[in-house]
Amino acid sequence: MRCERSVQTVGSGVSLRDHSQVISYGLRCAFALFLLAPLGACDSAERSGDQASLVQAPPGESAEFETCASTADCKGALRCLDARCATVARSRLGDYHAARGRRSLAQGELDAAASAFNDAITTYEKESLTPPTELLCEQGMALAKARDDAKLAEAASRILHKCVLAVPPSSSVATAAMDALATLGDVGLDGELLARTETADLYLTGESSGPDLSKLRVEVSSDGKITKSSFNEFVAALRTDENKAAFQGCWQAAWKQHKQEILDVSLNVGYRFFLDPDDESRDRADIKVEEMAGISGAGVVQASKCVHAIAQTTATDLAKKLRQDTRWKSKIQIRVGEGN
């Protein structure tokens, strides 16, 4: 309905009857407009002021792992779960494999853990789902546990770098990932690469480093049952600075190969003296050192043999100087490690 008819005054030559008709028409028009106003036909105020209330609130700004009070606080399709923004696009089978990985990792089964996390990632991809960021981080942390394997350490570095790029820097996941990356510095991870905003081609470009050898302690102990001077001289010979440095070298080899922090080797030692009935000058002492099964496990066999060889060389050199007509047997324990 249009309301464009002009209204003239009486002074313009319009009769009173015509004037009343104009007023009547105007009242009818005004009433009609009043009825139509809610529909927005002739109300400019509705177009300018009230439409602001119809605009949707801006999307949330919290990223995955960041805090939230409700889902409205989270970006995109993330939902607020336990006061954290999280993805809900999950694969049950993928999460099952991830649980297997965590269980194997807790039991120290590193190969099984790495395999399970790989199954989890693969399952998500087969179901056309993006693997959850925390799953990627867990996989990297599991691989970092097997850092003595150069290939696994390299893979762990790359995956953990992706992890820290994807999660908020202050989150607990980022802290755990950085802690895992720090352990890879011992096997040559170039930490400068982590400052990049994209992954690198190669991460293990530096020299493997270990604890400072000057901080290593070498302890030589016995069962304390032997009081013979020849025994005391042998223990003292094992404790010389020269031998301690040699034992540290054995430890370093074990650390580089197996990340063995403590090298513990037990030795059986026996002393005998042989008299020559015809020539006193041919009398001789003999100290025999036999390696026992150490508490360090099979992973450091070569390092244990290294300690045994040093101890036997020391015993042979010392025996040439000894002339005590006696015999004894004892157990010696040589322990090398930082702060032990």
Image (spheres, grey):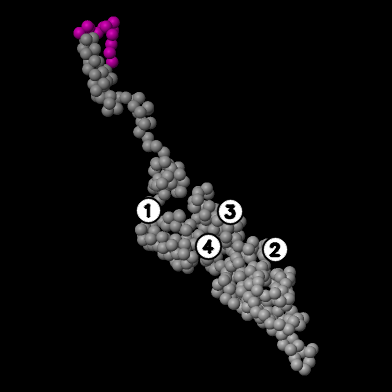
Task: Please state which amino acid type lies under the numbered disc 2.
Answer: Ser
Circle 2 SS class: helix
Q: Disc 2 versus disc 3: distance between alpha carbons?
A: 31 Å
Circle 4 SS class: helix
**Closer to the camera, 233 or 46?**
233
Q: Disc 2 versus disc 4: distance between alpha carbons?
A: 27 Å
Q: Position of residue 130 (x, y in %)?
A: 41, 56
Numbered disc total: 4
Task: Please state which amino acid type lies under the numbered disc 4.
Answer: Ala
Q: Are marks 2 and 3 in contact (CB under 8 Å)?
A: no
Q: Are marks 4 and 3 in contact (CB under 8 Å)?
A: no
Mark 1, residue position: 89
Seen at 22% across and 7% down, the residue is: 15
Seen at 54% across and 68% down, the residue is: 149
Mark 4, residue position: 144
Labels 2 and 4: the sequence-earlier one:
4
Mark 3, residue position: 195
